[in-house]
Image (cartoon, rainbow, N blue to C red):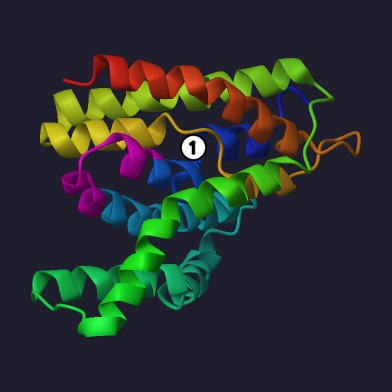
């Protein structure tokens, strides 16, 4: 990875691993009341990041005139996402007080309880294909931006700008303190090495410290 690769650095610094690590961390470390805010964060995360990426890509290529078409494609794809659809349906059913009948509820809750350990199992399987190598200096910079600067920005915005409720704000900080999203692992370095994979693996190992720090300072 070239040290100054802006696309990869920006993607690594802003894309958190919400599905494979933030979800099990919230389920295993926090009270059940934090799960609904996390579901909303997960639902909005992919939509917002895909939209921002499309905008930045068009601006960088001087294709500002294509922004409406790009946004239309992104929104169409995100709206059809099974993850987003499932999250919206689940929130709606919760709000209307719908209860799963009999055996159906037993199966659904069984699958629900398995979500956290399965996510961690999948995370380990994906990380197994990556190895540390290439420009480690750039990987450390990207990891530091993701694990330190990102949660600090979220905390500052939630505290001094948006006045977010403590529960939501600290859950957002915890999510921001997660390592780089696994999707960044597909990014290749300028010398043919899997620079994205190095960043994902390194940031995941170092996230032990960032997650522990958030839990330590949790009000």
Location of residue 202 with respect to 171 vertically, above or below: above
Q: Residue at x 41, y 75 (%)?
A: 79
Q: In the figure, is residue 181 to the left or right of 187? A: left
Circle 1 SS class: helix
Q: Position of residue 115 (x, y in %)?
A: 43, 57
Q: Residue at x 46, y 67 (%)?
A: 71
Q: Is residue 51 or residue 200 the one in the foreground?
A: 200
Q: Is residue 32 in the magenta section?
A: yes
Q: Residue at x 49, y 57 (%)?
A: 50
Q: Is residue 21 or residue 2 the one in the foreground?
A: 21
Q: Quadrant of the C terminus?
A: top left
Which of the 4 quarters of the picture holds residue 84? bottom left
Location of residue 37 with respect to 128 vertically, above or below: below
Q: Position of residue 78 (x, y in %)?
A: 45, 70
Few, some or many residues within 10 Å of mark 1 (<14, 14–19, 20+) = many
Residue behind mark 1: 14
Q: In the figure, is residue 105 to the left or right of 164? A: right
Location of residue 187 with respect to 4 vertically, above or below: below
The residues colored magenta run 25-37
């Amino acid at each position: 990875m070239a040290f100054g690769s802006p696309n990869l650095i920006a993607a690594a610094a802003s894309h958190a691993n919400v599905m494979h690590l933030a979800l099990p961390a919230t389920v295993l470390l926090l009270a059940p009341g934090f799960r609904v805010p996390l579901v909303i964060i997960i639902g909005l995360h992919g939509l917002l990041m895909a939209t921002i990426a499309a905008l930045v890509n068009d601006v960088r290529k001087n294709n500002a005139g294509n922004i409406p078409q790009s946004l239309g494609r992104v929104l169409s794809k995100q709206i059809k996402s099974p993850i987003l659809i499932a999250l919206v349906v689940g929130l709606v059913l919760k709000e209307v007080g719908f209860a799963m009948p009999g055996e159906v509820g037993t199966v659904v809750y069984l699958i629900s309880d398995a979500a956290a350990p399965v996510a961690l199992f999948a995370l380990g399987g994906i990380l197994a294909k990556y190895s540390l190598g290439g420009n480690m200096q750039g990987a450390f910079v990207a990891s530091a931006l993701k694990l330190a600067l990102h949660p600090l920005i979220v905390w500052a915005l939630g505290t001094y700008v948006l006045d977010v409720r403590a529960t939501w704000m600290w859950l957002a900080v915890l999510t921001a303190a997660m390592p780089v999203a696994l999707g960044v692992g597909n990014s290749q370095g300028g010398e043919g090495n899997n620079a994205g994979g190095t960043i994902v693996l390194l940031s995941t190992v170092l996230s032990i410290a960032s997650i522990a720090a958030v839990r330590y300072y949790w009000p």
